[in-house]
Structure formats: C-alpha cells, structure tokens
Image: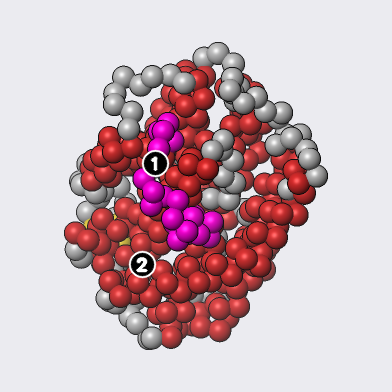
Amino acid sequence: MGADTQTGSERRIAALDALRALAAFLVLASHVAFWTGEAGWSGVGIIAARGDVGVAVFFALSAFLLVSPWWPDPVAPRTRPGAGRYALRRAGRLLPAYWVAFIGVLAVGAAVGGRTGARPLPGVHLIGDALLLQGFTQVTPQTFTQTWSLTTELCFYAIVPALGAVLARRRAATVLAAAAVLGIAVQGLVAAGLGHGRVGAALGMSLLGHAAWFAVGIAVLGLRRGGRRLPVPDDGGTWILVAAAAFALSCTPLASPGTGPGGLAAPHPGQAMAKEALFALVAGALLLAATVPGRSPAWVAAPLVRHLGRVSYGVFLWHLVVLQVVFAGLRLPLFGAPFGWVLVLVTTATVAVASLSWRFVEAPAIRATHRDDRAGARP
C-alpha cells in the first residue's frame, strides 16, 4: 500500500499507478457494501463485497516493487540500498500519512462515534495501533479496521532484504510455490478452527497467512526481469480476462459463503482456500497485464489516473472515517442505506481528503527520504 513506484519506464509507472488506484477503489467499495448492507442483499453487493481483493493486489504490487532492487537485472543493474536507507524510505512512505490519519480517526470518533456505534479504545490499544500492531492485537477503531494489512506489510518490509537475496539465487520458483501453498493452507486451517478468536484472526491476516499474495508479485517480477516467454498469449487483454474470470469465481459459492444482513458469513475451509488462491490469481494476472512489454493504452497515463494512483494510500487510510462521517452526518441507518449514491459520495470525499494527504504529508515525506537521489546517489 505504501510501496513506491520504482520501475524502468514511464509506461510501466503509469500502468502500476492505474493498478494501485483500482485496488484502492475496490477496498473502498467493499466497505461501502458492508456498511450499507448491500453485501447481504444483492448480486451487486456481493460483487462489491469481494472488493477486498484489492488487498491482494496491494500486497502483490508491494512485493513486485520492493524486491526489485535485490533481483538481478541484466539490462539495468542496480546497487542495492543499504539497510538504513531502505528502512528510512519505508518509514517515510508508510508512517507520516498513517499517523495523521490515525489522529483524524480518533478525532472524528470522539465527535461522532456515538452516532455510528463506535466505541473509544483503551490507551494501551491506542499505543499498539500507533505502532502498527493491530494486525497482531486485532483491536483498532471501527473506522481503522482496514489497517490490519499495514501490520502485514510492515512484516514483509522487514524480510525484504533477506528474501531478495535468497530469491535472486537458484530455485526461486520452488521457494515461491512453497510459500503460496503454505499461505493457502494456513487460510484453510484457520477456517477449520486453528487458533481461536483473535489468535486465529491474527494468523489468517499475517504475512504467513497471505504469503500467496506476496509470492505472485515476486513471481511476476522474476518472469519480467528474466525475460522469459510465457506459454500463453502475453498481452494485457488476455491477463485482464483471466483476472475477471478468477474474480467472478470468487463471487460464487466456491469461495463465498452464504450472505446475510450487512456482510458475509464465515467461510468453510475449502472456501477460504479457494478465495485465497483466486485472489492471488487475480492479483498476479492484473500485475502481468500492467507489466506487459510494449505500449499500454493511453488512458493509463491520463492525469486523473496518475493522480488516483498517487493518492491511493490516502484513499485506503481515510475512506472508512469518511464513511463514518457520511453515515453520522446524514443519519443513515447501518445496513440500511442506499449503496449507489453513498459509494459516489464517499469516493468523491475520500479522494479529496487523500489529495490533501498526498500534497501536505506524503509527498513532502517522500522528498525528505529521497534527498540522496537528488544529490546524485544511485537508486
């Protein structure tokens, strides 16, 4: 979610920005479907509820981008960043915007939380959330629940240097395949009752539980960096069709349990494993589409698309608290509000807030942590 777009061409940067924007919108749509109750009542709602596939796309994109400096590039060799420089950049990209959003969530919760059923958290949990530990504790404000994935991202950031060094050697395909199978298996075991309550939830949301989503991102990097020819037509349209087919399957009983008011019921092990695998396929196919060599459609480089890609992290951070303000301000009933216009209103307002976050928080933090590049250091 906070990964920088570090690629070798403007075309690819534009395509990945478009992919990042899509992922953010999908996550937003899934939460609007839940809050309005549409997720439990209509086909459109069920489809929107599967927008949590956006998290898989974010994870795959992070893996593709962050492992890149450690993967040998025969065309444009790079110097691997030092540990301190790498950590500073990751912290600068993730934390300032997160802390500002966290303060905003607490402020809005104190002002309107009672109208939407939100409860204040004890101080010890606030400290944990400030340190991005909510993926482990499973306790966070109602309008910041999406940030469990940042705990998982942070864990991935921590292992990237070592992981990149391992995968740059032989047998990378075997390591990635094993990681994907393990992650899918963990989802099945959690659904079957491995761990109880917060322990099981934390395991399912962990880096181990979503290893398949990161693995597909690294696999796409290896394919593109190695210049290997795929045994299928390698064009954007083909991969988009593959992603659409996998997404459609994820909306069926194969991967989606029965629905009820407000959201989805708990899946059985087979459904949990199918969903994890299908989401990995969606993420991998979209990433392959975004990185096909050659020309991309002109729309991916359009100013609006590029802007939405830049502000996608802010959209991810702010959309739930904007949703809370909309429900409280318009006195909308939880699980009983109109999906369509709430989606439009929340999307518009969230993009506006995220744009401010980009201009005044994220962009300055990125500039501050990349000063060595402007001074002439190698990337």
Q: Earlier in the sequence, mark 1 or mark 2?
A: 2
Q: Is residue 261 left or right of residue 86?
A: left
Which of 295/60 is in front? 295
Per the rendered image, the range of residues in magenta is 291-312
**What's the residue at 43%, 86% (across, down)?**
329
Q: Count neighbours of disc 2 (C-alpha within 10 A) and say few if under 14, some if 14 to 19, many if 20 or more.
A: many
Residue 307 vs 153, above or below: the answer is below
**What's the residue at 54%, 56% (across, down)?**
310
* Image position, residue 351 (x, y; %): 48, 68
Which of 368/212 is in front? 368
Examine the structure image and report whether residue 299 is included in the region drawn in magenta.
yes
Q: Is residue 188 visible?
A: no
Look at the numbered disc 2 and give the secondary structure of its residue: helix
Q: Which amino acid lies under the numbered mark 2 shown in the image of this protein? A: Val
Q: Distance of mark 1 from mark 2, alpha carbons?
A: 31 Å
**Mark 2 sits on what residue?**
32
Q: Count neighbours of disc 1 (C-alpha within 10 A) and say few if under 14, some if 14 to 19, many if 20 or more.
A: some
**Mark 1 sits on what residue?**
296
Q: Is residue 90 left or right of residue 310?
A: right
Q: How is the image coloured?
A: secondary structure
Examine the structure image and report whether residue 272 is included in the region drawn in magenta.
no
**What's the residue at 35%, 54% (across, down)?**
51
Tell me the tag on residue 129.
none
Q: Quadrant of the C terminus?
A: top right
**What's the residue at 68%, 53% (across, down)?**
366
